[in-house]
Image (cartoon, grey):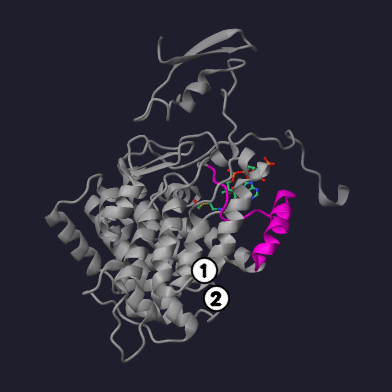
């Protein structure tokens, strides 16, 4: 049987044959080239057939070798490695290297990579000045997005996006500086002095120190919490072509520099349907307040009054594997921090929802955001900071996707088509005659 698709246009009776190509797995990623459909024309003058796909529900915008998701089976892999194994055996910086380079690093490569990231953690002193200019109660994502965009003005060399060595330098800078900027933003919100990076600490240990150290006291991160945060960062490192990654690729496809492109990606992440959901989950659990209120709350969600935050996913139609790992990690965290009472509400909410036909029939399962917020809160992070905690590790994914796009000869400036449904051509009427 040929790997092709035969289409008959009933307007003309003409038949067309298009090749079908595949990704790594033949049952996942079979596709035709959308441009082939242009050959299908009702008349010779026709523009050719378009596909109408709002929200890109069935359109592959790129070929990618970074992340594989099988949403029906609940599988997530980075460069072929299962997320469970990476969460158990790897570190965030090693995973970031893997995502960016395609292979796990050798010991020498890892040492060099960690050194490079560690030694780019400082930010220009002027950046502190404009962080100072934000209101103390400004949302940290607004501050993060603006500050990352502003880095573009500090590193004008970053505009040479076709130079691969240059791209690598910006990648080191961004992965290194995101935790520093995020911690400075938090310190600004609570009116404390900025704490400079400590190069002797790990990536997550240093971030915890910049967030939580008190003046005059040596801060040593709790090793359990340092490791849990590292696992959280691994789980959030990449998730293929979601809203923010598509924003990264879309903006960077115009050859905009990586700072403004990444700011756009972070802006997309900020929305409550994407990375802002972890914050909304916490607010939802607080609003529910007690297990007795859950049945009524679920009833209202089913009636369409609001959505259960942390439930459902465009791709996963099964339990999100990241949520499963987080759920099992919660007890480890609570042994150090004390139990977050919101966990009991979350567990009961999950139990009730997963027995309810509304959620079962729509395949709505807990996603990564359902349990992450409870853990972040127990660790002492304020709710507003949750999307920032998503953005820090996702920076590695955004940059890997950017790098892949820059190397992909199929890619050009992103420019979707539209189906025009406005009025046909008509003549202008002077204002007095309307
Ligand atoms: N609560 C209640 N009903 C829901 C929910 C929910 N959380 N999610 C989807 N539905 C219903 C929706 O009303 C629709 O029902 P019907 O067919 O009767 O109209 C059906 O399920 C399909 O929903 P959809 O909006 O077509 O699905 P989508 O693929 O466009 O949306 C989603 C995916 C993640 C935006 C959505 O599930 C949602 O809003 N979830 C809550 C927000 C959330 O947790 N977001 C984090 C996503 S994971 C982290 C990340 O990758 O950013």
**Residue 289 is a magenta residue:** yes
Residue carrying label 1: 142
Residue at the image point whose x is 43% and y is 42% from the top: 413
Specify whether 402 is left or right of 290. Answer: left
Q: Which segment did they paint magenta?
A: 288-314
Residue lying furthest right in this view?
Answer: 433
Specify whether 233 is left or right of 109. Answer: right
In the picture shown, does residue 16 fall above or below 270? Answer: above
**Residue 292 is a magenta residue:** yes
Residue at the image point whose x is 57% and y is 41% from the top: 55
Tell me the distance, in whole angstroms, between the alpha carbons under discs 1 and 2: 7 Å
SS for callout 1: helix
SS for callout 2: loop
Residue carrying label 2: 138
Q: Position of residue 366 (x, y in %)?
A: 54, 51
Mark 2 beta carbon near ligand 1 (under 8 Å): no
Question: Who is closer to the viewer here, 297 or 60?
Answer: 297
Q: Position of residue 38 (x, y in %)?
A: 52, 23
Residue at the image point whose x is 55% and y is 70% from the top: 341
Question: Who is closer to the viewer here, 421 or 398?
Answer: 398
């Amino acid at each position: 049987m040929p790997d092709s698709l035969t289409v008959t246009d009933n307007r003309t009776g003409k038949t067309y044959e298009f090749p079908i190509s595949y990704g790594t797995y033949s049952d996942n990623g079979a596709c035709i080239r959308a441009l082939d459909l242009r050959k299908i024309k009702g008349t010779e003058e026709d523009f050719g057939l378009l596909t109408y796909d709002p929200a890109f529900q069935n359109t592959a915008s790129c070929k990618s070798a970074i992340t594989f998701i099988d949403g029906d089976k609940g599988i997530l892999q980075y460069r072929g490695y299962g997320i469970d194994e990476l969460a158990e055996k790897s570190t965030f910086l090693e995973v970031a290297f893997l995502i960016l380079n395609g292979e796990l690093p050798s010991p020498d490569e890892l040492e060099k990579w960690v050194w490079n990231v560690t030694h780019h953690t400082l930010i220009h002193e002027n950046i502190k000045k404009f962080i100072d200019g934000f209101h103390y109660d400004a949302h940290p994502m607004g501050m993060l997005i603006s500050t990352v965009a502003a880095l573009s003005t500090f590193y004008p060399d970053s505009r040479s996006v076709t130079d691969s060595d240059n791209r690598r330098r910006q990648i080191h800078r961004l992965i290194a500086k995101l935790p520093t900027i995020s911690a400075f933003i938090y310190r600004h919100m609570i009116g404390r002095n900025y704490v400079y990076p400590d190069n002797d600490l790990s990536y997550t240990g240093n971030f915890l120190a910049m967030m939580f150290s008190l003046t005059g006291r040596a801060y040593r991160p709790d090793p359990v919490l340092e490791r849990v945060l590292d696992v959280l960062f691994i789980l959030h490192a990449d998730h293929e072509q979601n809203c923010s990654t598509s924003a990264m690729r879309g903006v960077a496809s115009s050859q905009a520099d990586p700072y403004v492109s990444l700011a756009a990606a972070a802006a997309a992440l900020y929305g409550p349907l994407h990375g802002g959901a972890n914050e909304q989950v916490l607010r939802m659990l607080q609003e529910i307040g007690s297990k007795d209120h859950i049945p009524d709350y679920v009833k209202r969600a089913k009636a369409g009054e609001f959505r259960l935050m942390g439930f459902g996913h465009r791709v996963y139609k099964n339990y999100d594997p990241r949520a499963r790992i987080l759920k099992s990690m919660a007890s480890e965290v609570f042994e150090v921090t004390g139990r977050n009472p919101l966990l009991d509400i979350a567990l009961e909410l999950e139990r009730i929802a997963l027995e309810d036909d509304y959620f079962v029939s729509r395949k709505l399962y807990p996603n990564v955001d359902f349990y992450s917020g409870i853990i972040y809160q127990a660790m002492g992070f304020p709710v507003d900071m949750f999307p920032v905690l998503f953005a820090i590790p996702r920076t590695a994914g955004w940059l890997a996707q950017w790098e892949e796009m820059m190397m992909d000869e199929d890619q050009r400036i992103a420019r979707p088509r539209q189906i025009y449904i406005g009025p046909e051509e008509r003549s202008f009427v002077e204002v007095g005659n309307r």
